[in-house]
Image (cartoon, rainbow, N blue to C red):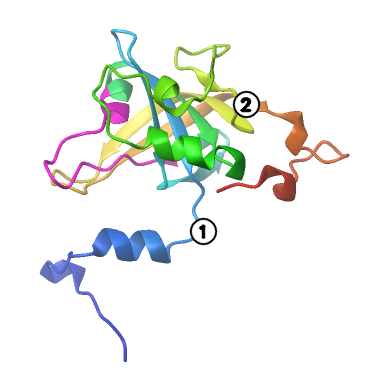
């Protein structure tokens, strides 16, 4: 027996669940942003990947909340200040990252709530995440709105300006060792 979902005919119940559990594995991006008032935000995203090497582009997609069709703070911050830190999530920080996924009011600093440590970035405003094995300082080149209803994505194209790699995840040749990286 085959389950068929006709998306074009409006069969979208459970679509997020089907897509997010079938398109795997997907790494988790932990994104650090800041708004014009200096309020910091930290949030994980599973819609994330690398899409270009020259220029080096990472993408992630904050989706609109399905219950009230509002934007997440990450998207609102990026609209104001077109910068972000995209950090990788490994097994060691998975629990803390899960805490940062809770929906806090905009002025609440998820670094404090999650117990993760802020580190000043070298060239952009949002903070690096000390515990992450790899942090990418990025400028946002584009935001592509993919729809206007709850569950619609907003594709963020972020150009990497600087990479910070914890040497603990490198092998003897200086390359990243996936077994040491332990990405979630």
Residue 163 tag number: 2
Identify residue for label 1. Answer: 25
Residue 111 appears at what percent x and percent y?
44, 22
- In contact (CB < 8 Å): disc 1 and disc 2: no
Q: Residue at x 61, y 40 (%)?
A: 92
User: Is residue 67 one of those drawn in magenta?
Assistant: yes
Q: Main secondary structure of the magenta part?
A: loop
- Outermost residue on the top side: it is 37
Image height of 21 relative to 102, above or below? below
User: Is residue 115 one of those drawn in magenta?
Assistant: no
Badge 1: residue crowd in 10 Å (few <14, some 14–19, many ≥20) = few
Q: Indicate which disc, 1 or 2, sits on the residue closer to the N terminus.
A: 1
- Horizontal relation, residue 147 to residue 124: left or right: left
Q: Residue at x 46, y 36 (%)?
A: 97
Alpha carbon distance from label 1 to label 2? 23 Å
Image height of 141 relative to 109, above or below? below
Image height of 108 relative to 173, above or below? above
Residue 94 appears at what percent x and percent y?
52, 42
The segment highlighted magenta reads 58-76
- Horizontal relation, residue 178 to residue 52: left or right: right
When asked about the image quadrant of residue 91, the answer is: top right
| Of 32 and 136, the residue lying toward us | 32
Residue 162 appears at what percent x and percent y?
60, 22
Q: Report the quarter where the N terminus lies.
A: bottom left
Badge 2: residue crowd in 10 Å (few <14, some 14–19, many ≥20) = few
């Amino acid at each position: 027996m085959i389950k068929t979902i006709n998306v074009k005919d409006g069969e979208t119940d459970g679509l997020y669940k089907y897509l997010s559990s079938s398109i795997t594995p997907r790494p988790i991006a932990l994104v650090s942003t800041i708004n014009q008032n200096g309020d910091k935000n930290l949030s994980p995203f599973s819609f994330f990947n690398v899409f270009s090497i020259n220029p080096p582009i990472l993408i992630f997609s904050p989706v609109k909340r399905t219950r009230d069709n509002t934007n997440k703070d990450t998207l609102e911050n990026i609209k104001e200040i077109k910068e972000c830190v995209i950090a990788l999530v490994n097994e060691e920080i998975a629990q803390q990252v899960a805490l940062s996924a809770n929906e806090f009011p905009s002025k609440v600093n998820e670094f404090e709530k999650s117990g993760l440590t802020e580190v000043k970035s070298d060239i952009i405003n949002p903070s690096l995440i000390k515990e992450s094995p790899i942090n990418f300082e990025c400028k946002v080149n584009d935001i592509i709105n993919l729809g206007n209803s709850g569950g619609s994505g907003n594709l963020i194209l972020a150009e990497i300006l600087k990479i910070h790699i914890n040497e603990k995840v490198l092998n003897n040749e200086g390359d990243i060792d996936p077994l040491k990286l332990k990405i979630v």
